[in-house]
Image (cartoon, rainbow, N blue to C red):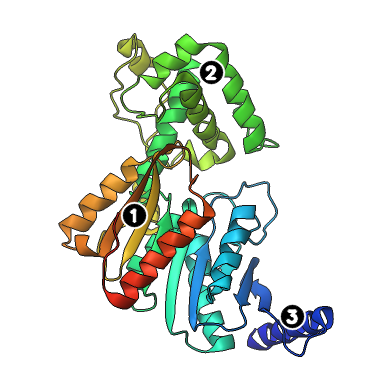
Amino acid sequence: MKNFHRLKFVSAIVILFLLSGAAYAEPTVVEGVIGPGSLYGIYVPEGWNGSVVFYAHGYSQLLNPIALPSAPEEIQLRDGLMELGYAVAWSSYSANGLAVKEGIQQTHQLKGLFTDYFGEPVRSYVIGESMGGTIALALAEKYPSQYDGALPMCGFVGGTLAENDYYGHLGALFDYFFPGVLPNDPEGWDGFDLFWLVFGAVTSDLARSAEMAQVDQLELPGMNAFQLALAIAYAAPFTVIEPQLREPWINNAETIYSGSLDDAALNARVTRYDRSPSTVNYLSHYYEPTGKLRIPVLTMHDTMDPINPFWHEEIYAERVQTHGASDLLLQRTFEQWGHCVFSVQERIDAFLDLVDWVENGTKPMP
C-alpha cells in the first residue's frame, strides 16, 4: 500500500511538471485511495509554512458517486488557505449519507498519510462543515495530542442522538400532518426530488404546515411561513433517503407531543419508533461529543439553522462547562437563517483567529 501511495505521488508530480513546464510543481498535489474506496487529496503550496489543515466534508447524498470535495466554497476555502501558506488535506468517505464513522476514521488517516509524504507538520488543524463539523469535533476530542486546534462549522455538535431525534420527530409529524406524501420505499429517490415533494405539500396547505410548526418538540427555525416551509422541506426527506432513521435510529416511543390543535389525536395516531440499546451504543461512538476539551475549539453556527439547529451549540456548551473546559471553547454565532451560509472569508477569518489562539494563547472575541 505504501508503494502504491508513492507511485501516485510520483505520478502527480510528473503530471504537474509536464503541464506547467516549470522546474518545480506549484503546488504539490498528491492524490490516491485510502483503504476500501475512499479518495484523498493533499495540496501543499510553494512556500509552505509547515502547518496543515485537515478538512472534513459534509453530507453527500447516497446516490452520489464517491468523490473528493468539489463545491465552489470548498475549493475557494482550500485555495484561500493555500494562499496563506497552509497545506490542505481532505478525503471522500468510503460511504455517502450519514457516514460519521467513516468520516472520523478516514479523515484521521490523512494525518499519517501527510506525515509519510511530507514529514511531521509544525501544527495540525482540523476543520469541517455540517456533518464534517461533527467529525472535526470528534477528532479534536479523541486525538488532542495529534491536532492543535479545531474549527467545526455548523455541525450537530450536540450529538448524533439529538440530531437523529430532530429528523425523526419531523419525519413522523410530517407523515401525520401530510399522510401519503413521502414514499415508503426510498429506491430511486434523491433528496432534491423529495425536497420539492415536501415543499409543494407544505406550501399548498399553509394552515396545516403552520399547525405542524407549532408542535413544541420540533423547535423549527424560521421567522415567516416561507422559512418554516423550507425548514420542513430540508429535513423531512431524510427519513426516506436515510431509511435507518425510521427504524431503529430514532426514538419517539415515549414522546408526548404538544402544541397542535388536537394533541390527543396526534399522540394516538403518530407513528412511533423505539431505538435499540445497540443503536444507542453505535451512535454514541459515532458521535456523541463529551465536552472534554484539551485543545482550542472555535465553532461557527447560524442561529436559525434548519439542518443542524442552533440548540446543538447550547447542548455542547453545557457539556464543556460540566468538564471545566469552557476556556477552550469559543462559539461564534451568525444571526441569520440558513445552513452554513457564512462566507468563505468569514470561515478563513475564523480559522486565522483559531491559529492566533493556538500560537499566542489569546482567546479570540466571539
Q: How dense is the environment of label 3, judged by Cα within 10 Å: few (below 14), some, or many (20 and up)?
A: some
Task: Name the residue rendered at 54%, 77% in the picture.
Answer: 85
Distance, label 2 to label 1, CA atoms, is 32 Å
Give coordinates of residue 72: x percent, y percent.
64, 54
* Viewer-closest of 252 and 163: 163
Position of 130 compared to 162: left or right? right
Q: Tags 3 and 1 in contact by the CB under 8 Å rule? A: no
According to the picture, the residue beneath numbered tag 2 turns out to be 202
Q: Quadrant of residue 25?
A: bottom right
Distance, label 2 to label 3, CA atoms, is 50 Å
The residue type indicated by label 2 comes to Val
Task: Name the residue rendered at 65%, 83% in the picture.
Answer: 1
Q: Quadrant of residue 146?
A: bottom left
**Total labels drawn:** 3
Q: Secondary structure at mark 1?
A: loop
Task: Name the residue rendered at 66%, 38% in the picture.
Answer: 190
**188, above or below 83, in the image:** above
Q: Secondary structure at mark 3?
A: helix
2 vs 1, front mark: 2
Labelled disc at residue 12 = 3
Label 3 vs 1, first from the N-terminus? 3
According to the picture, the residue beneath numbered tag 1 turns out to be 288
Label 2 vs 1, first from the N-terminus? 2
Q: Does the image show residue 348?
A: yes
2 vs 3, front mark: 3
Label 2 vs 3, first from the N-terminus? 3
Give coordinates of residue 106: x percent, y percent.
53, 68
The residue type indicated by label 1 comes to Glu
**16, above or below 69, in the image:** below
Distance, label 3 to label 1, CA atoms, is 38 Å
Task: Name the residue rendered at 36%, 28% in the picture.
Answer: 218
